[in-house]
Image (spheres, grey):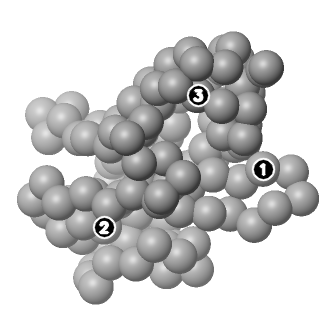
Amino acid sequence: QVQLAESGGGSVQTGGSLRLSCVVSGYTIWPACVGWFRQAPGKEREGVAFVIGRGDLTSYDDSVKGRFSISRDRTKNTLYLQMSRLRPEDTATYFCAARLLGPCATTSNAYANWGQGTQVTVSS
């Protein structure tokens, strides 16, 4: 059973930065797809950034390209989301998720393993 635990959320002003972390445990082989989603009140959960496969191929939603960066530390079994130039519209609960087998997808219904979420609030 793959388990994920996020940390690093908080409150920042517009233009600020935050780094989210997600410790991934309980796997035999690193999941084929890992990524970050976010969900704002009253909105659907949306994909933000993904590491595709067991290499370093990444994918980003257009709304965060050039501002967010996803990475992972294999030695720490940890997935990161570095968020810069934050905007009020980035305010949401951020979740990390894992899909054990490919092919990878960017829709939330393709992921069965989720963390508990961490809140990010960006004030203007």
Q: Residue at x 26, y 41 (%)?
A: 71
Assign the C terminus to one quadrant of the image. top right
Say what amino acid the circle numbered 3 marks: Leu
Q: Quadrant of residue 50?
A: bottom left
Circle nearer the N terminus (1, 2): 2
Residue 25 vs 118, above or below: the answer is below
Figure disc tally: 3
| Residue 54 in view | yes
Mark 2 falls on what kind of element?
strand
Left or right: 30 in relation to 105? left
Question: Which residue is at 61% across, 44% downward?
Answer: 94
Q: Earlier in the sequence, mark 3 or mark 2?
A: 2
On screen, residue 120 versus residue 34, left or right, reads: right
Separation (CA) of disc 3 from disc 1: 15 Å
> Callout 1: few (<14), some (14-19), or many (20+) C-alpha neighbours within 10 Å?
some
Residue at 23% across, 41% down: 72
Q: Label 3: state its secondary structure.
A: loop
What residue sits right under mark 3 in the picture?
Answer: 86
Discs 1/2, front: 1
**Which of the 4 image quarters holds residue 108?**
bottom right
| Amino acid found under the numbered disc labelled 1 | Ala
Category of crowding for the residue at label 3, using alpha-carbon neighbours closer than 10 angstroms: few (below 14), some (14–19), many (at least 20) = many
